[in-house]
């Protein structure tokens, strides 16, 4: 089974389209920060705008995932893409016109709320398409491909922002994100591969209510994902401040994109960890590694010295994400796997927003080091949480209900794949 078989199933044009449709979500956060900072409003305001974008995405992502199951990807995807593109243009006009921060942040929140969930939805498409073609054995190949494309998009997105910022017009990156949303995400929503609506019931059945999530364990994992999200937000804001202080604001995206390279490489290496290295112990080790990776940022003194530290940080990100998602998948009942993954991904998005907002305020006072210190603090929270919950998670894993047999319904592959219907964030594909 090869990646060439995927092109024959959906068409090579679909592979290209789905990649470009992901780029706006990867470009918008950094493009927004660069635009606001360049307008002279300061890092605190930029952090608030970025936070509004992230909080909107955290709230809208799970809702859009549910709506696409109920009403179909074409209808919901089209509305979301048009709304998101329009909201990004509204943010651009608000910043350029010098409007007050509150309406600007409201437009940013709307843009985040409507971000089309391209990465998660394309996975659902593969499950449906390959199942209908009798090629279900290709599904692992498709999931592997999508993971690589997600990582590539979160490297290419900030890098593209950096290249466009070199034009000297700060509005260009966000404008390009809005135009890509309309010219790539809309065709993606309408593509022939979009599956029909599943008409998921609005209310849970009695059987569903008995399959509840372990609340305490899930709450701990959501906070853990909030912590790594804060690392993302603080690092992006700190890197923007670093580039600004060096007189090279357009280089922020290029430098931050290096985190994605390190994460992709580490994600591949995670496959080789021994099975005897249990998830609970791996979780604590990954958290400690994340703290070490963020601490390396405090050694940055120049823009030229930042990329090596970004690679080191990226190398600690993937193992943490992979382990957290694996823990959630193991401890959550099968019927609630989608809810579990959505909660974790929303935690990352909310953490990114909060980390960017706090780091923006500190960047105004202490420069990029102050912003990077927020990332270190978030990683320290991750370590404390992992240490406090390791034994409880190990006990939960020991008693986790394991699948007793193959799925009995024809729709099982698509339902299983739908656990990836989560907001897109850097590294979220690694699990």
Image (tube, helix red, strand yellow):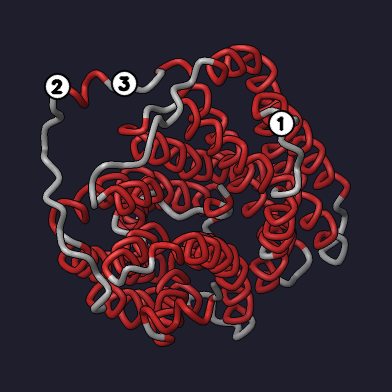
Residue 212: give its label.
3
Q: Is residue 290 left or right of residue 192?
A: right
Instruction: Report helix, strand or loop for mark 2.
Output: helix
Q: Position of residue 63 (x, y in %)?
A: 25, 46
Q: Position of residue 309 (x, y in %)?
A: 82, 54
How far apart marks 1 and 3 lie (CA) works out to 26 Å
Residue 31 seen in render? no
Identify the mark nearer the N-term, 1 or 3. Answer: 3
Residue 282: give its label.
1
Of residue 157 and residue 353, the one placed in the foreground of this image is 157
How far apart marks 2 and 3 lie (CA) works out to 11 Å
Residue 210: name its quadrant: top left
Q: Position of residue 329 (x, y in %)?
A: 47, 35
Q: Residue at x 78, y 37 (%)?
A: 289
Residue 290 seen in render? yes
Q: Residue at x 56, y 42 (%)?
A: 229
Say above or below: 161 vs 225: below
Of residue 405 and residue 189, the one placed in the foreground of this image is 405
Instruction: Report helix, strand or loop for mark 3.
Output: loop
Q: Position of residue 386 (x, y in %)?
A: 66, 22
Residue named by callout 2: 206
Of residue 215 and residue 412, the one placed in the foreground of this image is 412
How far apart marks 2 and 1 lie (CA) works out to 36 Å
Of residue 109 and residue 152, the one placed in the foreground of this image is 152
């Amino acid at each position: 089974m090869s990646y060439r078989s995927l092109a024959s199933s959906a068409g090579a044009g679909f592979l290209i389209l789905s990649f470009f449709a992901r780029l706006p979500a990867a470009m918008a956060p950094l493009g927004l920060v660069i635009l606001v900072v360049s307008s002279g409003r300061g890092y605190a305001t930029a952090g608030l705008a970025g936070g509004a974008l992230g909080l909107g995405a955290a709230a809208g992502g799970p809702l859009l995932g549910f709506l696409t199951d109920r009403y179909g990807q074409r209808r919901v995807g089209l509305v979301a893409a048009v709304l998101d593109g329009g909201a990004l243009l509204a943010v651009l006009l608000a910043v350029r016109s010098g409007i007050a921060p509150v309406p600007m942040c409201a437009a940013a929140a709307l843009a985040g709320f409507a971000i089309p969930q391209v990465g998660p939805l394309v996975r659902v498409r593969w499950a449906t398409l390959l199942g209908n073609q009798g090629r279900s054995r290709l599904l692992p190949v498709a999931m592997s491909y999508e993971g690589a494309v997600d990582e590539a998009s979160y490297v290419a997105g900030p890098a593209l922002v950096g290249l466009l910022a070199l034009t000297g017009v700060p509005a260009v990156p966000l404008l390009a994100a809005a135009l890509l949303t309309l010219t790539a995400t809309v065709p993606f929503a309408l593509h022939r591969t979009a599956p029909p609506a599943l008409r998921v019931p609005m209310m849970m059945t009695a059987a569903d209510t008995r399959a509840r999530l372990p609340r305490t364990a899930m709450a701990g994992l959501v906070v853990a994902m909030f912590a790594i999200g804060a690392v993302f937000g603080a690092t992006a804001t700190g890197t923007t401040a670093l580039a600004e202080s060096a007189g090279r604001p357009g280089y922020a995206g290029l430098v931050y994109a290096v985190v994605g390279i390190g994460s992709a490489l580490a994600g591949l290496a995670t496959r080789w960890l021994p099975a005897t290295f249990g998830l609970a112990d791996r979780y604590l080790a990954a958290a400690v590694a994340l703290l070490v990776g963020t601490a390396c940022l405090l050694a940055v003194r120049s823009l030229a010295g930042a990329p090596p530290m970004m690679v080191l940080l990226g190398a600690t990100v993937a193992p943490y994400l992979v382990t957290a998602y694996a823990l959630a998948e193991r401890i959550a009942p099968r019927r609630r796997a989608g809810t579990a993954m959505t909660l974790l991904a929303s935690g990352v998005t909310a953490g990114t927003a909060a980390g960017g907002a706090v780091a923006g305020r500190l960047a105004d006072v202490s420069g990029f080091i102050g912003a990077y210190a927020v990332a270190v603090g978030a990683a320290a929270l991750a370590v404390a949480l992992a240490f406090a919950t390791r034994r409880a998670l190990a006990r939960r894993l020991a008693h986790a209900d394991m699948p007793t047999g193959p799925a009995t319904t024809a729709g099982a592959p698509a339902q299983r794949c739908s656990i990836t219907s989560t907001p897109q964030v850097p590294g979220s594909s690694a699990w």
